[in-house]
Image: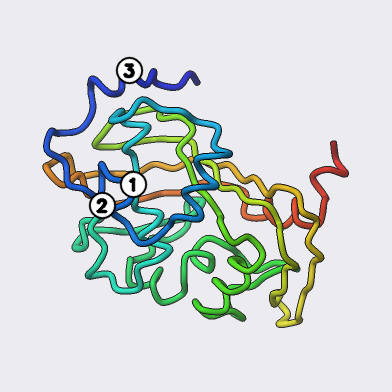
Amino acid sequence: MASVDAQDVQAQSAPPGLPDYVLDADAAPDYCKTRKMWDETKKSNHTAGSLPDLVVKNWEVEASHKTDLADWRTIDKAKYVFSVNGGPDQTGEHMLKVGTYNALLEPSEFYCPRHSTFDDSHKTFKHMMPAFAWEVLEVYSGPPQVAFRWRHWEVMKEDYVGSNKKGDKVTIKAHGRPIDIEGVAVAVAVVNDKLQLQKVEVFYDPMAMFRQMVGADEDMD
């Protein structure tokens, strides 16, 4: 499927007078190290103000860094839900309770959300990859239902230390190479002066990160 041209999407896009959390990359919490890495290593270069540039721009930052749902401005709090790979809807309160990593990952030989708290998960992955950047690569449809392809990446700078589905400690030595994950998502937004998200459905391979951590993907090339 061909992606929507950035200029075409810009023409069809969002209402004028959008709030700062949609337009301003610095409106979300302090993200300077990740934004610097994002700017230096991103693959996309969307037209400023186009839908690829705006879509879910600060939602990921809020979900990762704001611990009180009342502080989230990118979502319609009364209706917002999140799901992974066709699974059950998760509320914003649930994501805040377990953390974004636990909301996205499944039990495996490398990691298990049941054996990791919100704080544990962030310490595990942010120690290993201090600036885990995220970008929109392509947008396939405009609002109110925005379908897009995304990328999440960083270099594995420190050892990974976590707990697997048996509760056993797992350590993977840092290899200093990139961890690069891609997936698709469908976001339903309210097309109004706030352009807030009501639903986000994410589809991706949750084991891709761990295969790259242990070098399995390279072995298969």
- Residue type at mark 1 is Ala
- Residue type at mark 3 is Gln
Q: How crowded is mark 2: few (under 14 residues within 10 Å), some or many (20 or more)?
A: many
**Residue 83 drawn at (x, y percent):** 42, 56
Which of pointers 2 and 1 indicates the residue nearer the eye?
1
Q: How far apart are marks 3 and 1 (CA)?
A: 20 Å
**Residue 124 drawn at (x, y percent):** 63, 72
> Are discs 2 and 1 less than 8 Å apart at CB?
no
Q: Residues within 10 Å of mark 3 (few under 14, many from 20)?
A: some
Q: Mark 1 points at which residue?
A: 25
Quadrant of residue 210 in the image?
bottom right
Between 192 and 201, which is closer to the camera in this rendering?
Answer: 192
As helix, strand or loop, the secondary structure at mark 1 comes to loop
- How many numbered badges does the structure rendering display? 3
Q: How far apart are marks 2 and 3 (CA)?
A: 26 Å
Quadrant of residue 52 in the image?
top left
Could you tell me which residue is drawn at 43 percent across and 61 percent down? 88
**Residue 189 drawn at (x, y percent):** 25, 44
As helix, strand or loop, the secondary structure at mark 2 comes to strand
Which of the marked residues, 2 or 1, is nearer the chain's N terminus? 1
Could you tell me which residue is drawn at 43 percent across and 57 percent down? 31
Residue 55 lies left or right of residue 64; in this view the side is left
Q: Mark 3 points at which residue?
A: 7
- Residue type at mark 2 is Gln
Which of the marked residues, 3 or 1, is nearer the chain's N terminus? 3
Of the 4 image quadrants, the one containing the C terminus is top right
Is 188 situated above or below 102? above
Q: Name the residue under label 2.
A: 198
Residue 204 lies left or right of residue 180; in this view the side is left
Which of pointers 3 and 1 indicates the residue nearer the eye?
1
